[in-house]
Image (tube, coloured by chain):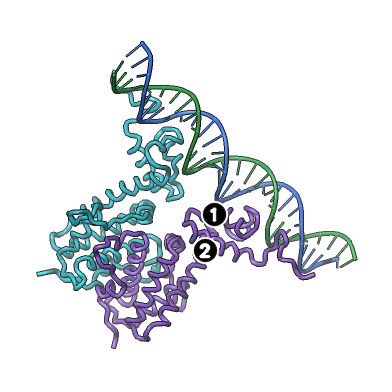
Chain colours: A cyan, B purple, C green, D blue
Amino acid sequence: MSKSTQKPHHHGDLRAALILSGIELLEEGGVTALTLRKCAARAGVSHAAPAHHFEGLQGLIRAITDRGMSMFATAMQSKIDAAEDSPFPRLYAMCEGYLNFFIEHQALANLMFNQKSELMTKSAGGRTTNAAFNILVSACAPFIHGPLGHQATEYAVWSLIQGFSHLTVMGQISCDPNQPQISVADLFSMLNLQVAE
Amino acid sequence: MSKSTQKPHHHGDLRAALILSGIELLEEGGVTALTLRKCAARAGVSHAAPAHHFEGLQGLIRAITDRGMSMFATAMQSKIDAAEDSPFPRLYAMCEGYLNFFIEHQALANLMFNQKSELMTKSAGGRTTNAAFNILVSACAPFIHGPLGHQATEYAVWSLIQGFSHLTVMGQISCDPNQPQISVADLFSMLNLQVAE
DNA sequence: ATTTGCAACTTGACACTGTCAAGTTAATTG
DNA sequence: CAATTAACTTGACAGTGTCAAGTTGCAAAT
């Protein structure tokens, strides 16, 4: 007979199932709903099963953060791919993907960006280990950099869209219905960016 | 005999003492150390005493956020007061106060800015109820505003310094020791700001 | 001055959490 | 087929937020 997948244990890929359950819980009930025991229950295993795949709750959170970062990167990349192939549209598309991810995955995004991790640490090749940040770097590349080099451009763009996304999601911006909603393009029109060449 | 302050209950101002204890716990052990029971113990009362002064843990967190916002406002204001009295120095001073608060009070700042609250909601007079945000608005006022008005300037400045502070504290920026540390002034040189008149 | 009322606080309980130690099961290996 | 081992279960423990029911002490009312 074929391999039974209904067996009491030996779930096909429990680790992945737990991460997925965790993200579901996060989206459904916010960060306080993310619980090792609830993840285990949702994946149909005992309450202590997760301990064999992660180092405690903090380990699960790290794994969820990794998975979230990959979702984040593809969200931005697909926005870029759908945009006109020139610097400003691509930059704006990336930022809209950034903001959109925060809006659509509030709890996950907040979890991810409240983790201490060194996203910008460069590996030997000068690239970073984080796919999302590499996308941002690429989107910033076509612009003229000031005396501080490309890094200042990247920091400014990143800080601006990160702060805007965070404040928006937290309801700390644009909550006055009388005022017009500000767009990503409006926001970035305040930034000193010029296409090189 | 004089009023004994050692009495089993009737602490002078328990509410304030609990808020203070909460902030201490936050600074000492991060957000996971902030606990109703530990606050109560530190203030020398029983574990259920806080319930009479706040609506559960969420209520204590709100109260701590309020207290933190006031600390935040005075931190920025005192930086401004110590700066040269002209627009750019004042803006930079405010931002340095902003960043500094995040560095010196990481856990508190993260707690505050992960609360959903409508900081920018304007009251009748056009001012907001939040002192910290009013300081930011004042620091932005002397600059020329684009077609989107002062609001766009405020959003851009706020997003930029919020994102930068957050990313810095989370270790997601400036973690490459080979690269130079970027300053607030460097960051804001990327922004399109000109003094009016 | 005594009673009454009430707000502040305590005590005890409950369900839920993360984590650990020990047991059980199933699949692989020799 | 026996032994090993990784995956998972079971049970326990301390800590948590929250609720219900006391207790206490002060202040106003009679």
**Residue B115 visible here:** no
Rendered location of residue B79, percent (x, y):
41, 78
Rendered location of residue A194, percent (x, y):
16, 71
Q: Which quadrant of the figure has residue A53? A: top left
Q: In this rendering, do the residues under marks 1 and 2 share a single chain?
A: yes
Category of crowding for the residue at label 2, using alpha-carbon neighbours closer than 10 angstroms: few (below 14), some (14–19), many (at least 20)? many
Secondary structure beneath disc 1?
loop
Q: Amino acid at mark 2?
A: Ile
Q: Which quadrant of the figure has residue B81? A: bottom left
Rendered location of residue B31, percent (x, y):
47, 56
**Residue A181 visible here:** yes
**Relative height, residue C14 to residue D17 (above, below):** above
Q: Which residue is mark 1?
A: B35
**Relative height, residue B27 to residue B130 (above, below):** above
> Residue at coordinates 64% horizontally, 56% vertically from top-left?
B49
Q: Amino acid at mark 1?
A: Thr
| Residue sticking out furthest to the left | A197
Q: Which residue is mark 2?
A: B64
Q: Which quadrant of the figure has residue A173? A: bottom left
> Residue at coordinates 23% horizontally, 52% vertically from top-left?
A131
| Mark 1 and mark 2: Cα distance apart in space | 12 Å
- Horizontally, residue A48 falls left or right of residue B194, namely right
Q: Closer to the N terminus: mark 1 or mark 2?
A: 1
What label sits on residue B86 in the rendered view? none
**Residue in the foreground of this view, choosing between B83 and A165:** B83
> Residue at coordinates 51% horizontally, 62% vertically from top-left?
B62
| The N terminus of chain A lies in quadrant | top left
Secondary structure beneath disc 2?
helix
**Relative height, residue A70 to residue A192 (above, below):** above
> Callout 1: residue from which chain?
B
